[in-house]
Amino acid sequence: MKKQLALLGFVLLSPSFSLASEGLDSLEIQRVVRTNLNQVQHCYNQLQAVNSKAKGKIKVNFTIAPTGLVSKVGIAEDTIGDAKFGECLIGKIMRWRFPAPRGGKEFSTTYPFTLTPK
């Protein structure tokens, strides 16, 4: 029997679209983020279990290695202000796998998440 996660709030995506001749374009990044959005939601559910009114925006910087694995993650901006949520999110993103960036070089990007209670 699978355990179902309770949806305590919403994680909204705010992507911008552009095509890249090197690295990855925003559609490729968004596809991976959407595939792993349940992991971000898990972190937010944990936060809401202790603070049901938690909301805000968090921008995450991450670097994708030539293999497509995430090699670095950091918080660029955070209006939520909960260290455990930030640590949870960083841990999840470190396990994501992207397509190999075009050009065979590291690729860095920033991705915003907006968190809104139900």
Image (cartoon, helix red, strand yellow):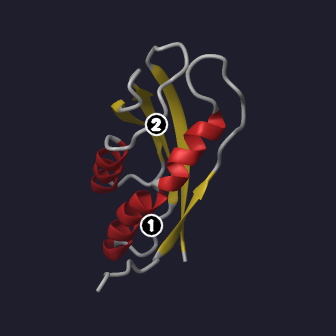
| Eye-nearest disc, 2 or 1 | 2
| Element class at badge 1 | loop
Query: Mark 1 sits on what residue?
Result: 54
Mark 2 and mark 1 lie on one chain; the one further toward the N terminus is 1
Give the residue at x 31% y 73%: 50
Image coords of residue 99 (percent x, y): 49, 33
- The N terminus: image quadrant: bottom left
Query: Which numbered tag is attached to residue 98?
Result: 2
Looking at the image, which residue sits at the far bottom?
1
Q: Quadrant of residue 23?
A: top right
Question: Compared to 118, does 38 lie above or below?
Answer: above
Q: Residue at x 37, y 34 (%)?
A: 74
Q: Secondary structure at mark 2?
A: loop
- Residue drawn at point x = 65 percent, y = 48 percent: 14
Q: Is residue 90 left or right of residue 10?
A: left
Q: Is residue 107 above or below residue 30?
A: above
| Kind of residue at badge 2 | Phe
Q: How many marks?
A: 2
The reply, left or right, for residue 55 in relation to residue 27 is left
Which of these two is toward me, 51 or 20?
20
